[in-house]
Every structure is written in structure tokens, then in C-alpha cells.
Image (cartoon, rainbow, N blue to C red):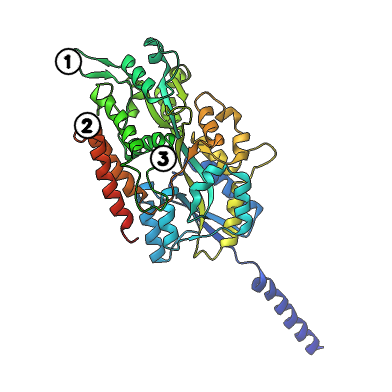
């Protein structure tokens, strides 16, 4: 009897230990992005819901300002404290791939991306013709104009080419008694992107691009590029804009036209309030009938060293899938709350109320029509843009001819492309 009791106790002890030994070890996934906690709120709510539906998974958010993001990524790799998921700015992609930081998506995720996202935006997640993440926030450029200033100047419609833009700018521009520009027909600046991205859009519209197909040189010394910069420089020479007029002045009524991104909707809302719709118009890039525009994006990828890659990809697929029939994805909800744009076809279809307004609809149409193009992802994109901005401004301000400024940019960028990465 004692032996039987002892054996029973031993068996119970073994059985009690089995759940602890075989229970699934909880998985903690770290999601790294540049968004603030308040901006992330819709996605954070989805994290908590995912945890409820998947009891073995916990999700932590790691926020890093965008200016410090790449440095933090590299530091975390050395320290062995890398996150599982990154929200990647497309121009960072090449460097991340070359340093073996990103994992290539499994085939089912690649198929999911190909079926559910606008093809032109998927291109921005390609490195060396291979896909590295799920597209998230997307930005592209259109002509944004002040409808009130157009009406005051007797201009019936936005310009469709650069010649008509120059004509409209001349009619809108106002100067003070000393000849200083008070209301500019058009404005640039102040960031690198405010110089490089409008230049790209006009170059795309001429069927050209900054880089050659082999990514070893540029098209900047060719007639199309010189013509684009000459047109921009004329605005300064003819006193239709000035270095002191910048795109942020648009809500104040001091600017007739800018080439602006879709995320500027929030700036317009804050500056104009209920007068936004009657003041702000959005039109195609004034590049003629074959106009194109430039787009860049963020995409979400998984760390190559993550021990939880299947769980990370499963989470990302869930976050980018509709939350029900006719509903947006979790990522789509966050982007809508930010006034940003998604290339997720389900999000676009479910967001007519938010994306169908007079400001956003032209951006969506440009995205869907294939007019929004991406540049190839190279490791030196940020450096290329800084060189381009510097030399473009030299031409704007009359310190160099457009041809000479672009020749200098061509040489500097070609040298950058030749450097080992």
C-alpha cells in the first residue's frame, strides 16, 4: 500500500511538472518606429488586441526620433538589443540590407504584398530586385495652389506646364515699394526635400531621372535636367519668388503655388481651419500631359537576427489586413489619423470619407494611376539629395548657371556612387 501511494505521488509530481516543461514560452516582439506615442495610439490599441487574441505574444514599442533612427539601429545591432520589427524609411533600405539587418519576407508575405498594395509603392521596398517589407506610409507630390490668389489674379485654372506656371506666378506676385517680393507666385524650401523632390518630379515628367540605370552616374548634365533647373531659376531671376519665401508660408496667404506632399494636409488644416477648402487647391504636376511625380515611403520589415521571425511576420500581416468587411487595416487607421496616405488597396477603398476630399483625392489618383514613381534604393540617397539641394540652390540664387551647377552635382554624385559602402 505504501509503495502504491508513493508511486502515485511520484506520478502526480511528474504530471504536475509537464505543463511547465511543455508550455509555450511567451514571445515578446519589439516594434521600432519614429512615431510618438500619441501618433502610435491607434496601432498601440491594435497591439493590445493582438495580445488578447494571441495570449503567447507580447508587443513592446520602441520610439526613436527619425533623425537618430539609423544610428540607433546600428548601435542596437552591436549591443545585441535589436528590435524584431522596423518601420523603415525607404532611403535607409539599401544600407540595412547591405549590413544584413533585414530579413527577406517569406513567400506567403511576398504574395500578400503583391496582391494587396499599389505596385508603384511596392517598388520602394525593393532592394536589388528583392522585396524587404510591407509598405506602410507613403508620400508623393502634387501642385498645391492658393485658389483665392488665383481668382484675384484672374487665373481660371492651375497651370499644366512650366510656361503656364511662369505666367500664373507673374500674375500672382506682389511687391512692396522697394521691389521686395511680398506675395510670391511660387515658393520652395527650406528643407533638402523641398529642393530635391520637386526637381525629381519635373525630371520624371520629362522621361528622365537623376541616376543612370547602372547606378554609377547621373543624367544631370543632359538637356532635360538643365531645362528643369533653368525653369526654376527663372522664378528667382524674374522676381517671382525669393529665398525668404518658403512652403510653410502658404497658409498665411503669401504663396501662390508650391510642389507639396500629401502630408501637408495637416499643415493646411492647422493654418487655415475652416477656410482650407475654399483656399487650397491640388492639381497635377505642371509637367505637361505625361506628367509624373515622385513618391517615397516607409515599409515594415523584420530583423534578420530576430529569434521570432515567424511571429513577427504574422503580426505584420495581421496589422496590414482589413479589420473586417469594408474596413481599414490597423496601420491604415493610424495613417488616416495622421493625415497620411496608405498604398494598401483595402485601406484606400475603405477611406473614401478621408481620402475622397478635394485635397487628398488627386494624390490618391496619382498613386493609383501609376504616375507616382520611385527612385532606385541606393545607400547614398541622403547624400545625393544633399549634394543636389546645394547645387540647385546655387542656380536658384544666381551664383552658378543651371548647367554649371548640375555639372558640379553630377561630378560629386558620381564620386559618391563610386565609394565603397
Find out whether the residues at labels 1 and 3 contact each other: C-beta distance under 8 Å. Answer: no
Distance of mark 1 from mark 3, alpha carbons?
40 Å
Q: Which residue is depicted at the point 40% across and 50% down? A: 64
Q: Which residue is depicted at the point 51% across and 47% down? A: 123
Left or right placement of residue 217 versus residue 25 in this view: left
Disc 2 versus disc 1: nearer the observer: 2
Residue topped by disc 1:
178
Mark 1 crowdedness (10 Å alpha carbons): few <14, some 14-19, many ≥20? few
Mark 2 element type: loop
* Relative image position of residue 335 (x, y in whole percent): 52, 39
Find out whether the residues at labels 2 and 3 contact each other: C-beta distance under 8 Å. Answer: no
Q: Which mark is residue 397?
A: 2
Mark 3 element type: loop
Left or right placement of residue 385 versus residue 48 in this view: left
Give the camera-side residue of 201 and 4: 201
* Relative image position of residue 92 (x, y in whole percent): 41, 52
Residue 90 can be seen, yes or no:
yes
- Quadrant containing the C terminus is bottom left
Residue 49 can be seen, yes or no:
no
Q: Which mark is residue 208?
A: 3
Give the camera-side residue of 1 and 154: 154
* Relative image position of residue 116 (x, y in whole percent): 62, 45
Q: Residue furthest front?
A: 223
Amino acid at each position: 500500500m505504501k509503495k502504491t501511494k508513493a508511486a502515485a505521488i511520484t506520478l502526480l509530481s511528474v504530471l504536475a511538472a509537464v505543463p511547465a516543461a511543455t508550455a509555450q514560452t511567451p514571445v515578446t516582439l519589439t516594434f521600432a518606429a519614429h512615431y510618438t506615442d500619441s501618433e502610435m495610439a491607434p496601432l498601440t490599441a491594435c497591439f493590445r488586441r493582438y495580445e488578447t487574441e494571441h495570449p503567447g505574444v507580447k508587443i513592446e514599442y520602441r520610439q526613436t526620433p527619425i533623425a537618430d533612427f539609423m544610428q540607433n539601429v546600428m548601435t542596437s545591432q552591436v549591443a545585441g538589443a535589436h528590435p524584431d520589427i522596423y518601420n523603415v524609411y525607404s532611403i535607409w533600405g539599401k544600407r540595412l540590407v547591405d549590413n544584413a539587418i533585414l530579413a527577406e519576407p517569406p513567400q506567403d508575405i511576398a504574395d500578400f504584398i503583391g496582391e494587396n498594395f499599389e505596385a508603384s509603392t511596392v517598388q520602394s521596398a525593393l532592394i536589388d530586385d528583392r522585396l524587404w517589407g510591407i509598405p506602410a506610409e507613403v508620400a508623393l507630390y502634387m501642385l498645391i495652389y492658393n485658389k483665392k490668389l488665383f481668382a484675384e489674379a484672374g487665373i481660371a485654372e492651375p497651370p499644366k506646364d512650366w510656361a503656364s506656371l511662369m505666367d500664373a506666378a507673374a500674375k500672382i506676385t506682389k511687391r512692396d515699394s522697394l521691389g521686395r517680393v511680398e506675395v510670391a507666385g511660387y515658393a520652395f524650401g527650406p528643407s533638402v526635400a523641398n529642393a530635391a523632390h520637386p526637381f525629381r518630379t519635373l525630371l520624371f515628367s520629362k522621361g528622365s531621372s537623376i541616376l543612370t540605370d547602372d547606378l554609377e552616374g547621373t543624367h544631370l548634365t543632359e538637356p532635360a535636367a538643365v531645362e528643369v533647373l533653368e525653369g526654376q531659376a527663372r522664378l528667382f531671376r524674374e522676381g517671382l519668388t525669393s529665398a525668404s519665401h518658403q512652403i510653410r508660408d502658404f497658409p498665411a496667404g503669401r504663396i501662390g503655388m508650391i510642389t507639396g506632399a500629401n502630408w501637408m494636409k495637416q499643415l493646411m488644416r492647422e493654418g487655415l481651419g475652416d477656410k482650407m477648402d475654399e483656399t487650397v487647391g491640388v492639381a497635377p504636376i505642371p509637367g505637361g500631359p505625361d506628367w509624373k511625380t515622385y513618391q517615397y515611403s516607409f515599409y515594415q520589415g523584420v530583423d534578420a537576427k530576430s529569434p521570432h521571425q515567424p511571429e513577427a511576420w504574422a503580426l505584420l500581416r495581421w496589422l496590414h489586413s482589413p479589420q473586417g468587411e469594408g474596413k481599414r487595416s490597423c496601420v491604415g487607421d493610424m495613417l488616416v489619423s495622421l493625415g497620411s496616405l496608405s498604398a494598401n488597396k483595402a485601406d484606400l477603398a475603405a477611406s473614401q470619407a478621408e481620402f475622397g476630399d478635394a485635397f487628398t483625392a488627386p494624390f490618391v489618383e496619382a498613386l493609383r494611376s501609376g504616375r507616382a514613381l520611385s527612385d532606385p534604393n541606393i545607400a547614398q540617397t541622403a547624400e545625393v539629395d544633399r549634394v543636389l539641394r546645394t547645387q540647385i540652390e546655387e542656380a536658384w540664387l544666381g551664383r552658378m548657371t543651371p548647367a554649371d551647377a548640375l555639372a558640379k552635382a553630377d561630378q560629386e554624385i558620381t564620386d559618391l556612387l563610386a565609394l565603397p559602402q
